[in-house]
Amino acid sequence: MVWMNGNFIKDEEAKISVWDHGLLYGDGIFEGIRIYNNKIFKLHEHVIRLFDSAIALRLDIPYTPEHISSVLEEGCRVYGQKEGYIRLVITRGVGTLGLDPDKCETPNVFMIFSTIQLYPKEYYEKGIPVVTAATRRPSSDVLDPRVKSLNYLNNIMAKIEAKQAGCMEAILLNKEGYVVECTADNIFVIRDGIIKTPDLSLGALGGITRATILEIAREEGLPFRETNLTRYDLYTADEIFMTGSGAELMPITAVDGRDIPYKKDGLTKRLHGKFVQKVNE
């Protein structure tokens, strides 16, 4: 099901012009949002991040945050599925073949209500191997990673490297060699009972699920740090997992051929259980 520029329509009726700057230049923003138990998870946080991205790109959303939220909630009811995934997209709109954003008069706003399954269910019990990509994450002075833009070519190039190596996921480093995140997910390392994740200043997106895991750590009194991590920290970790709205919480069991055994009684399993509990609540 699709909501587009004010109306619910059939997905086959949803069309974007070839002149849209979102298509021509990746000029736009998006959010990936989960539906659990017929309700939208972390709705407020997603909408705030959307409007923050729009402010950074000087992209004027033709609706208020309250209106976007109400449409998302209405769409969730109309969609009618207990579990689902929403892709909320805003493009600069129809313009010319030049870069000038002022040539785009009206942004396109649409929401896709569907399902998503990035990994087979059994992988959540046995984990996945990953590789570090040669593709580096652009630094914050090039494009701030906190802007969740439509330009995902950097991530796609790293994903290609992962698949060529026989893996489903890759880890991106920044130009200094510090760990940033996976192609579409944040990453966490556990060593000696301490939960560590790359600081956002290193080039990671401020993921909603990432923030939820840190929230759980605070509530459970678990020590955690947002810090610098290198590949050495990955290779010598007790546990590693990645988080995202699509992936939720996925264990990582090998990095560049170094095994990281998944512990069924480990902290990753405990955090996943607390995450599921928070979702249900």
Image: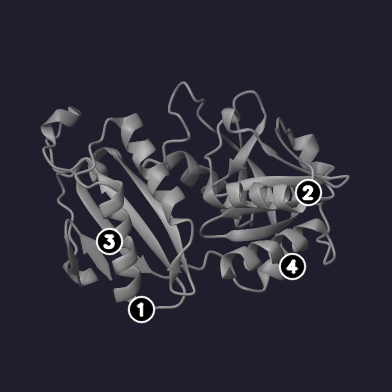
Q: Could you tell which of marks 4 and 1 lies nearer the N-terminus?
A: 1
- Position of 157 with respect to 201 (left or right) is left
Q: Could you tell which of marks 4 and 3 lies nearer the N-terminus?
A: 3
The circle drawn on residue 71 is 3
**Which of the pair 205/157 is nearer the observer?**
205
Circle 4 — which element? Answer: helix
Q: CA distance from mark 1 to mark 3?
A: 14 Å
Query: Residue 26, located in which quarter of the rendered image?
Result: top left
Q: Quadrant of the C terminus?
A: bottom right
Residue positioned 48% across, 56% down in the render: 42
Number of disc labels: 4
Whether residues under marks 2 and 4 lie with C-beta atoms below 8 angstroms apart, the answer is no
The amino acid type found where label 3 is placed reads Val
Tell me: residue 32, above or below residue 146. Answer: below
Q: Position of residue 223 (x, y in %)?
A: 79, 43
Circle 1 — which element? Answer: loop
The amino acid type found where label 1 is placed reads Gly
| Badge nearest the viewer, 4 or 1 | 1
The circle drawn on residue 126 is 4
The amino acid type found where label 2 is placed reads Gly
Residue position for label 1: 80
Q: Could you tell which of marks 2 and 1 lies nearer the N-terminus?
A: 1
Tell me: residue 221, above or below residue 60. Answer: below
Q: CA distance from mark 2 to mark 1?
A: 37 Å
Tell me: residue 137, above or below residue 152. Answer: above
The amino acid type found where label 4 is placed reads Lys
Residue positioned 30% across, 47% down in the render: 65
| Badge nearest the viewer, 2 or 4 | 2
Q: Quadrant of the N terminus?
A: bottom left
Q: Could you tell which of marks 3 and 2 lies nearer the N-terminus?
A: 3
Circle 3 — which element? Answer: helix
Farthest residue toward the top?
141
